[in-house]
Image (spheres, rainbow, N blue to C red):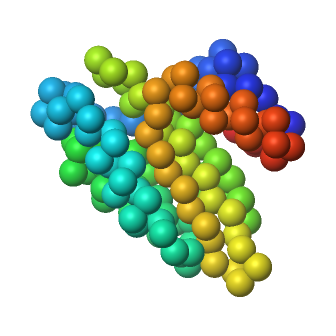
């Protein structure tokens, strides 16, 4: 069943906080998330073998920004899934991750860091298009 981000955020148990080893906004600058999103786009421009490989790439790229994705935070559903993670700090951001298995058996993987209004718009447009979000 599709739910809005607002409904999703009400149940805090559904949002996993990304760990930080330092003050990301101060260390990397205010546009760190745009640079990281570009790196996500490059890392996932082609299908990958498994969701675990995708999460491994996300984890590796985030380490450069002093962010750690908890290993237990992503239950791997075999064909498709999506998750939202909170990156708490001076500029509250959310990491949205989704993957779906293609007909070839490989996976399309997507990761993006967004602020709350952008995430709301993203999730609302996905719901409007008839693609239910299983958050």
**Residue 86 visible:** no
**Residue at screen point 26% across, 50% down:** 63
- Residue 114 to residue 64: above or below: above
Q: Quadrant of residue 134?
A: top right
**Residue at screen point 54% across, 29% down:** 118
**Residue 82 visible:** yes
* Residue 62 in the figure: left or right of residue 25: right
User: Residue 46's x, y, as percent?
Assistant: 52, 74
User: Residue 40's x, y, as percent?
Assistant: 40, 57
* Residue 101 in the figure: left or right of residue 49: right
- Residue 69 to residue 59: above or below: above
User: Residue 27's x, y, as percent?
Assistant: 13, 33
User: Residue 11's x, y, as percent?
Assistant: 66, 19
Q: Nearer the viewer, residue 55 or 100?
A: 100
Q: Nearer the viewer, residue 58 or 72?
A: 58
* Residue 101 in the figure: left or right of residue 111: right
**Residue at screen point 48% across, 69% down:** 45
Locate the N terminus by quadrant. top right
**Residue at screen point 62% across, 21% down:** 9
- Residue 41 to residue 106: above or below: above
* Residue 88 in the figure: left or right of residue 124: left
Q: Residue furthest left?
A: 27
Locate the C terminus by quadrant. top right
């Amino acid at each position: 069943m599709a739910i809005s981000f607002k409904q999703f955020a009400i149940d805090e148990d559904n949002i996993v906080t990304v760990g930080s080893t330092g003050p990301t906004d101060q260390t990397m600058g205010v546009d760190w998330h745009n640079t990281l999103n570009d790196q996500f786009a490059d890392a996932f421009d082609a299908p990958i073998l498994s969701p675990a490989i995708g999460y491994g790439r996300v984890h590796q790229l985030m380490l450069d920004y002093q962010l750690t994705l908890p290993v237990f935070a992503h239950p791997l559903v075999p064909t498709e899934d999506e998750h939202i993670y909170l990156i708490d700090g001076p500029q509250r951001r959310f990491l949205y991750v989704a993957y779906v298995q293609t007909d070839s058996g490989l996976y399309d993987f997507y990761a993006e860091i967004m602020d709350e209004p952008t995430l709301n718009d993203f999730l609302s447009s996905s719901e409007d298009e008839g693609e239910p979000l299983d958050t």
